[in-house]
Amino acid sequence: MKGYVQIITYGCQMNDLDSRKVHSLLAGDGWMQTESSTEADLIILNTCSVRQKAYEKALSTIGRLRPYKRKKPSLIIAVAGCIAQQKGADIIERMPHVDIVLGTHQLHRITEIINKKRLEKRTQVDTRMNECIPSMDIVPDAEFVTPSHRAYINIMQGCDNYCSYCIVPYVRGKEISRDHAHIIEEIRVHASRGVREIFLLGQNVNSYSGGMGFPALLKSISEIDGMQRIRFTTSHPKDMSDDLIDCFAGLEKLCSHIHLPFQSGSDKVLELMNRQYTRQGYLKLVRKLRAARPDIAFSGDVIVGFPGESESDYQDTLDLIQEVRFDLLYSFRYSVRPGTKAAGLEDSVLREEKQRRLVKLQAMQRKITLECSQARLDKIYEVLVDGVSERNPDQVHGRTTQNSIVNFTGSPSLIGTMARVKVTRANPNSLTGEAAEKP
């Protein structure tokens, strides 16, 4: 055994998947997992710079690791992910207790870089961007696929859209799609292990082009024996094709849920954001999706207080939310991301006003979310059971095809299986139900 490794992850599902891949690579090289920074011989921070909160939290954690390094000089501290890509060697200049900085295209080199650091004792920095990303083809070991019935799979990385507020194209690079044959093979491996739901990941899955288009990929995946559910994220509205919408009508395994970020309900703000669609264009997509799959649930992302956003623009956003009636909404105050085009705009909305708008929007969305849940009362859903409820050991919890969380009385033996559940109560963030008789 080489020692103990602690991996601390910030940000999105893609970062979480990257961390699982790193765990697999390190386990194969003789490293054991630990949750203790005191016990660790190697600490890896897999960072995110898309959201200000995740960015600040990661930098704070890096700083707090300095005393651990003083106590154990042999401790190796590595920074990976978006902040590593964005800041590069500046991280070591500012925080000399950091030993390794590894960019988003170099994850596959993690064991090589660590071994090089141990041998040469010098700091290691690699933030090169490649024409291909080998880490996308790394399949995590079964022990790192948790829960064991759900697997997350990279199908592409990077983004070519350059939304004016977004750092992703600069830290993840241009869009690179993974070969469809490798994706299909990985899903077959997961299916053989008992995985029943797969979650396809990419910054913009709609523009996938790995030898076939995204709708064709979904159709190929739906033919794999043993796989019962397909989910994906994230979709860009400008690339939501009629062929993809038809998949919701024709593919039974494709879940009745879509995450479709809209960011603003104002055409003026959407243009400033370089989103490349209009308010009416977005609403037209929602109507088409509902026509294809009447029970479909929507989630989305929205930013308030973007430079130049007036009270009228903000009201347009509230009106869009009321019209679409999202099951779930991820809402944020605008924060400047250095290096983006929007960073050159005057941040004209005061922080206090941004907060007021955010609080009002979130209160409205909580009401809509509860009403969406109440509309599911007395209905029966197929629930993929994820685990035992934390609050009630006699209950298990799982997700409907609409991605709603349901708690109901049941045995842990149900985990990883489908259960028919009748909804009996609507809660602010979940549903409560009871097992229903099979037809």
Image (spheres, rainbow, N blue to C red):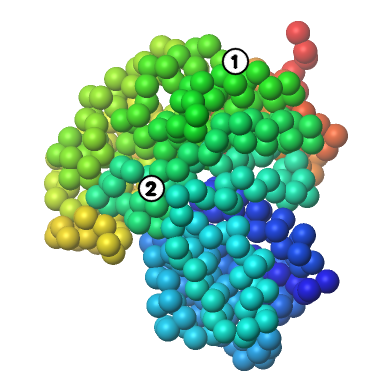
| Separation (CA) of disc 1 from disc 2 | 32 Å
- The reply, left or right, for residue 55 in relation to residue 400 is left
Specify which label sits upstream in the sequence, 1 or 2: 2
Determine if residue 425 is in view: no
Among the 4 quarters of the image, the one containing residue 192: top right
Task: Judge from the rendering whether residue 235 lies leftward or rightward of residue 355; answer left or right.
Answer: right
* Residue at (61, 24) in percent of width and height: 221
Residue at 68% x, 33% y is: 185
Q: Residue furthest top?
A: 439
Query: For the residue carrying disc 2, how many other residues have a C-alpha within 10 Å: few (<14), some (14-19), or many (20+)?
Result: some
Q: Amino acid at mark 2?
A: Lys
- Identify which residue, 221 or 116, lies in the foreground: 116
Residue identifier under label 1: 252
Q: Residues within 10 Å of mark 1 (few under 14, many from 20)?
A: few
- Residue 235's mark? none
Q: SS for tag 2?
A: loop
Instruction: State which mark lies toward you, 1 or 2.
Output: 2
- Tell me if residue 207 comes above or below residue 103 in the rendering: above
Residue at the disc numbered 2: 174
* Amino acid of disc 1: Glu
Looking at the picture, does residue 200 appear above or below residue 3?
above
For residue 120, which quarter of the picture?
bottom right
Instruction: Tell whether label 2 touches label 1 (CB within 8 Å).
Output: no
Image x and y of residue 254, in percent? 57, 22
Residue drawn at x 65%, y 48% is: 138
Q: Position of residue 129 (x, y in %)?
A: 44, 58
Secondary element under disc 1, as helix, strand or loop, is loop
